Amino acid sequence: MLRSRVLSFHKTVRRSRVISSRHNQASPASAQCRRNASTASRRMGATHLLTNIAVGSVGVGIGVLLASKPLPSEQRIQYADRGTMLKAAHAIEAVLGEDGVSYDEDDIEAHGYSDWSTSNSTGRPVAVVYPKSTEDVSKIAQICSQHDTPIAPFGAGSSVEGSFSSPYSGICVDFTNMDQVVAFRPNDMDVTVQPGVNWTTLNEQIKDDGLFLPMDPSPTATIGGMVSTNCSGTNAFRYGTMKDWVVNLTVVLANGQIIKTRHRPRKTSAGYNLTSLFVGAEGTLGLVTEVTVKLAVIPQDTSVAVVSFPTIKDAAGAATSLIRSGLQLAALELMDDVQMAVLNKHGSAAVRSRTWDERPTLFLKFSGTTASINNDISNVETIVQPYQPGRFVFAKNKKDEVDLWAGRKEALWTMTSIKPEGYNIWSTDVAVPISRLAEIIDSSKEAAAKLGLFASIMGHVGDGNFHQAAMYDPKDKSQTEAVTACVHDMMDRAIQMEGTVSGEHAIGIGKKGCLVDELGPDTIQIMKNLKSAVDPKWLMNPGKVFELPQGAKAVAAP
């Protein structure tokens, strides 16, 4: 069916940046992003897009022409009131059964707020639903569409940008019960799973066939959430990000329609790449109910090494040289002096069994044959010499390897464990071209040090991605303003270096304004046009990635 929709981009872009606090104080960074986005919009003028959109059973065709027409009335989004949303929940209960729907306040709170998230909303879903199949999800979507009720998908709840929050209330769809391996095909080196499958559990199940999914996000992450945010983790330097491993998706659209994005060959040039359209979309285009991913061969051998440097600039410079050397490292990670001190004082027993140099440190993971690993280790020692390295610590056995790498994997958990009651941790990430990596890490570390607060740098420097974390009291206005300014300045620097404001955390509700700063309003408008094509009522995870269309009547909770 061909539909012509006239959409205008926002002349002003409203960003709701909410600090992770039960008081949900608005971040000054959001106001700064709004000012930047508004300025960009005025500068680019009132350009409008006329989008001819063909929506079929297997895809979306888009042709874009310039036009200047008002927003059509059907695009003035409005959601149901709470009573109607509850009617939708009861209709879903009739489909899923009493055990398939929860109205419990604690359950709802756990699905609407997270201590992990830098961004939260005061909005909460009216109910949490637990489907078990694609057909269940399709019926949920149909009911929500009939009742104009928003849908927020929920995986493991480990998002740090509020991706699963419910600023417009609605129904939260928790995929916990969709945790089955649908088909494992070792000879094809792929597997099809439901979205609730945990990636570490999957790798444990298939390891005897010599295969694994080489992503390495939070151990709690599920495949559905990993697709939603295009996750990566420590192995991205060697293996890429989630988008590089997804073969196809089964997706339920907002009206309940079920589509599969493509078949299973390793390569195809047939039609639009719909798989990539849904990967990283944060559930704003549809609900992913099955995922086919490629698998990699488990390396014959692995090892780990750790080496410290006198300054963060030296460590970042060494990392850049290692990247440019062409060595096939499995992972290249950085932790600053603050993080290393935390390991010595608060790490697990295994981590504290050794004394770590409290200086900026690179964690290196090697993989391949035993001979190639030994050769790579020798090359690393030579390459980093110009950067005044401290002592090298190499894993002598497999236990040593696990314990050394635990220092990197435990970083966030350890930092969270020492957070004072009532304090927040603002953790965010950026990514830049490799040639600018040392510069932005050095300047960001210098800025963070001036806060007078707990602030640290760590990250996946092998692919130009790093994280900054700051601990502060959200009730202290001066601390909050200082931290938000520091974080925003880091994102500004990344954009100026042709980088991105989110290397792996996605956008959620926290970085919407800064995404406009990065891409500009015209590019954001194309994204909105795509959403309108497959979700004309804007029911799928509304308020994430970008704001609702101009003229929308729905109002988000703060």
Image (cartoon, rainbow, N blue to C red):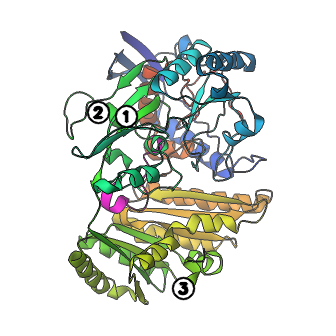
Task: Determine whether, in the image, residue 533 is placed left or right of residue 479.
Answer: left
Task: Determine whether, in the image, residue 485 is placed left or right of residue 189.
Answer: right
Amino acid type at circle 3 is Arg
Task: Determine whether, in the image, residue 518 is placed left or right of residue 55.
Answer: right
Quick check: is 473 in the magenta stretch? no
- The disc placed on residue 273 is 2
Q: Residue at x 65, y 28 (%)?
A: 99
Residue annotated with mark 3: 354
Q: Mark 1 and mark 2: span between their CA atoms?
A: 7 Å
Q: Above or below — where is 159 with respect to 59?
A: below
**Eye-nearest disc, 2 or 3:** 3
Classify 10 Å Cα crowding around label 2: few (below 14), some (14-19), many (20 and above): some
Amino acid type at circle 1 is Leu
Disc 2 and disc 3 in contact, CB within 8 angstroms: no
Where are the magenta residues, as a range? 228-240
Earlier sequence position, callout 2 versus callout 3:
2
Q: Mark 1 and mark 3: span between their CA atoms?
A: 46 Å
Residue annotated with mark 1: 277
Classify 10 Å Cα crowding around label 3: few (below 14), some (14-19), many (20 and above): few
Quadrant in which the C terminus is drawn: top right
Q: Secondary structure at mark 2?
A: loop
Image coordinates for residue 65, horizontal then vertical, percent = 34, 21
Q: Above or below — where is 505 with respect to 286?
A: below
